[in-house]
Image (tube, rainbow, N blue to C red):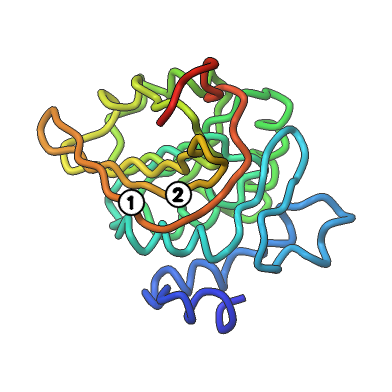
Amino acid sequence: MIDCQLRPNLVRDPDIIEAFLKVPRDRFVPEHLKTIAYSDRNIKIGDGRVLMAPMFFGKILQHCAISPTEIVLDVACGRGYACAVLSRLAGTVIGLESSSSLVTGVSALLTDLSVDNAVVVSGDLRKGLEEEGPYDVIIVEGAVEVFPEEYKKQLASGGRLVLFERLENGNGQAVVYLKHANTLSRRILFDAILPVLPEFVAEPGFVF
């Protein structure tokens, strides 16, 4: 995974590489998917969630340049893999999920892996988690067709919001929004297609 997927795609930050090496990716997928846990693909892991391809995840981490003092909100965190990796890069990680039963399982797994600076809570993905903000980084683990407006005020100045935007033609792209005072600037990072999260499906006629 490191030598064939990350480094060839210019993911070479030593802290990111070390984080990937230390987190057992196969612990975060159902038993019948363990043999493909390290493959270069998005893996559907149930509950409407996906374990994004290592290349996609590594590249957005490289672009975010997370520091050890920063607070990260991981939206639609699924089974918690990204939370565990992020916990090795950030000061605090908060995973947000809509399913309370999924949260229970993720919390138990993070505890088992001695991850003590990450927590997972249940809530409405569309609203984010304002009470724990502002966040230096917000990552949404799934595609969106509409921009999550609530996240604007939850970003700290200098904060980064990473989205996988689904386009009208069916293609997608990873995008980072940078907050400067009260304004956001947008930059396309790379082409990427993830399943659209139900909470961020557009009304008919909407175009990104």
Return the x and y of residue 148 as percentages of the image width and height: 40, 25
Front position in the image: 117 or 159:
159
Residue plotted at (33% across, 40% down): 161
| The N terminus lies in quadrant | bottom right
Graded by Cα atoms within 10 Å as few (under 14), some (14 to 19) or many (20 or more), the crowding at tag 2 reads some
Under circle 1, the secondary element is strand
Q: Is residue 197 left or right of residue 146?
A: right
**Mark 1–mark 2 contact, CB under 8 Å?**
yes
Q: Identity of the amino acid at label 1?
A: Ile
Q: Residue furthest left?
A: 181
How many tags in the picture? Answer: 2
Residue plotted at (27% across, 32% down): 155
**Mark sitting earlier along the chain (1/2):** 2
| The C terminus lies in quadrant | top left
7 is higher (above) or lower (below) than 72: below
Residue plotted at (74% across, 63% down): 37
State the residue position of label 2. Answer: 173
State the residue position of label 1. Answer: 188
166 is higher (above) or lower (below) than 5: above
Q: Is residue 176 left or right of residue 128?
A: left
Return the x and y of residue 6 as percentages of the image width and height: 51, 74
Q: Is residue 138 left or right of residue 80?
A: left
